[in-house]
């Protein structure tokens, strides 16, 4: 099983979280995503367009965590798919592995979140 520390995904997410840039998605004291309606989607789109892997990895993690608590909206699901595609493509290239295998590894990392989503459905 691939751990986040092995793939660089955890380090990418942590470095963004610790950034002082106010345009990032804010976290509350329980370290879960703070939802502000369309504000989350707007900030997420900005982070996806930044081209910075750590920004995109952070968006992916946040959308997975939002999906754990509630069903994602259509726009959020699209953003999750885009973030997954970008992160998996970058990691596949840098690790010289198949992109589908990387997606499977990322889904393994968030297996508890995915299970919660399936239970709700």
Image: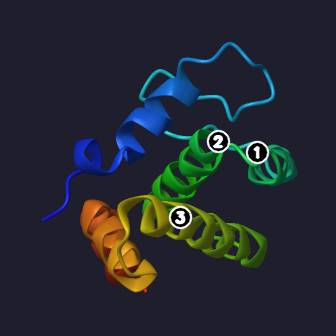
Tell me if label 1 and label 3 are in contact, CB under 8 Å: no
Q: Position of residue 55 (x, y in %)?
A: 64, 41
Q: Please tell me which residue lies in front, 101 or 19.
A: 101
Quadrant assignment for the C terminus: bottom left
The extreme left residue here reads 1
How packed mark 1 is, by other alpha carbons closer than 10 Å (few <14, some 14-19, many 20 or more), is many
Q: Is residue 83 left or right of residue 37?
A: left
Tell me if label 2 and label 1 are in contact, CB under 8 Å: yes
Q: Which residue is mark 2?
A: 55
User: From what the image shows, is residue 109 above or below residue 27?
Assistant: below
Q: Earlier in the sequence, mark 1 or mark 3?
A: 1
Q: Is residue 35 left or right of residue 68?
A: right
Q: Quadrant of residue 103?
A: bottom left
Residue that appears at 49% across and 51% down: 61
Colour approach in the figure: rainbow
How packed mark 2 is, by other alpha carbons closer than 10 Å (few <14, some 14-19, many 20 or more), is many
Q: Which residue is mark 3?
A: 70
Res 55 visible: yes
Q: Which residue is mark 1?
A: 47
Residue that appears at 62% across and 18% down: 19
Q: Measure the alpha-carbon separation of dots 2 and 1.
A: 5 Å
Give the secondary structure at mark 1: helix
Give the secondary structure at mark 2: helix
Q: Position of residue 87 (x, y in %)?
A: 54, 61
User: From what the image shows, is residue 29 above or below residue 43?
Assistant: above
Q: Please tell me which residue lies in front, 87 or 114.
A: 87
User: From what the image shows, is residue 11 above or below residue 80?
Assistant: above
Give the secondary structure at mark 3: loop
The extreme top residue here reads 20
């Amino acid at each position: 099983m691939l751990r986040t520390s092995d793939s660089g995904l955890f380090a990418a997410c942590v470095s963004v979280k610790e950034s002082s840039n106010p345009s990032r998605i804010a976290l509350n004291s329980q370290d879960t995503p703070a939802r502000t309606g369309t504000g989350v989607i707007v900030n997420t789109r900005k982070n996806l367009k930044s081209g910075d892997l750590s920004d995109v990895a952070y968006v992916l993690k946040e959308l997975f965590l939002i999906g754990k608590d509630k069903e994602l909206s259509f726009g959020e699901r699209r953003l999750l798919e885009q973030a997954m595609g970008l992160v998996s493509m970058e990691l596949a290239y840098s690790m010289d592995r198949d992109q589908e295998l990387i997606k499977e590894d990322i889904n393994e990392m968030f297996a508890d979140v995915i299970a919660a989503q399936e239970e709700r459905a």
